[in-house]
Image (tube, rainbow, N blue to C red):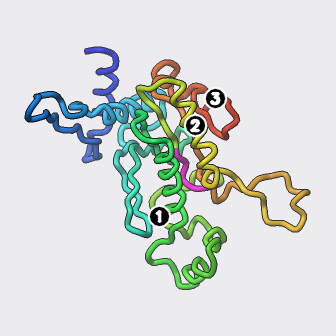
Amino acid sequence: MGADQARTRRGEQLLEPKGIRVSALREEKYDPVTGQPLGAGYDDHAAAVTSTAAELHRAGIGHRLGFQTEIGHRLGNNYVQRADLVVRAPEAGVPVLLLEIDRRTEDAHDLVAKLRRYGEWGRLLPKDADKHTVDLARSRPDAIEHVDHEKRLWRRVYPPTGREGLVPVAFVFADTIEAKVANTVVVLEEAGRPYWAPRWYDTLHSKAVTARDYRQAVPVVVTTLEKFQEHGADAAVWRGGWDGTARRR
């Protein structure tokens, strides 16, 4: 068994215990006339997801039962945004992290749309929210920003992150080249700015305030599976803040 296959199998073993859902491998299909394979018979995306989990675990980020795949986040219009991988590793300083694994089969703007939907999900109230909170949230478009995170739906699902903002999202690119990753990051940086960027604090003396308000932002980091495998997921392989630098988690 090769190194890549071993990593994939290790990831499958991590995700299998006690009913944790694993990204399913697709059934191999062939053209009835030519006999040629129709797309990828082996789900390379599922392999990348489990390999990512394996690399995180190898770096001490997450235990065997701290990984879940294909976790749905239902929006107000009933659209369900599914995270490829959810990691809970408070002992490693990562209370929760939603990961999107992309083998560059998706358009960069599709990733921006996912980022937008995670932001929308983070603004939802639970169905049993008290009337005062509901009325406040409906009073004007930005009123939800004045509702404490403890009263929002996402805090019923995930623990506090220990940082400002909503649930953090990581984009992990796999089986691709640096140029494609760089181009995608540019799109995420520019088109995704309304969702990840901080805002100025509301104040009558804005010029005197130098800090930025991240409370309504979706924290975003990006990296590649290849960097995980080469350097380890606990190395300076994470890029965030759009300053062009690699960071540790």
Rendering coords of residue 246 (x, y %): 64, 29
Magenta residues, start to end? 165-169
Q: CA distance from mark 2 to mark 3?
A: 13 Å
Nearest the eye: 220 or 93: 220
Is residue 201 shown left or right of residue 184?
right
Nearest the eye: 37 or 134: 37
Task: Look at the image and tell me in which quarter the C terminus lies.
Answer: top right
Is residue 206 shown left or right of residue 217?
right
Label 1's element?
helix
Instruction: From the image, tell me which residue sits under label 2.
Output: 185
Label 2's element?
helix
Instruction: From the image, tell me which residue sits under label 3.
Output: 246
Picture residue at 80% right of the left edge, 52% below the top: 211
Instruction: From the image, tell me which residue sits under label 1.
Output: 156
Rendering coords of residue 125 (x, y %): 50, 71
Q: Is residue 10 above or below residue 94?
A: above
Residue sticking out furthest to the left? 32
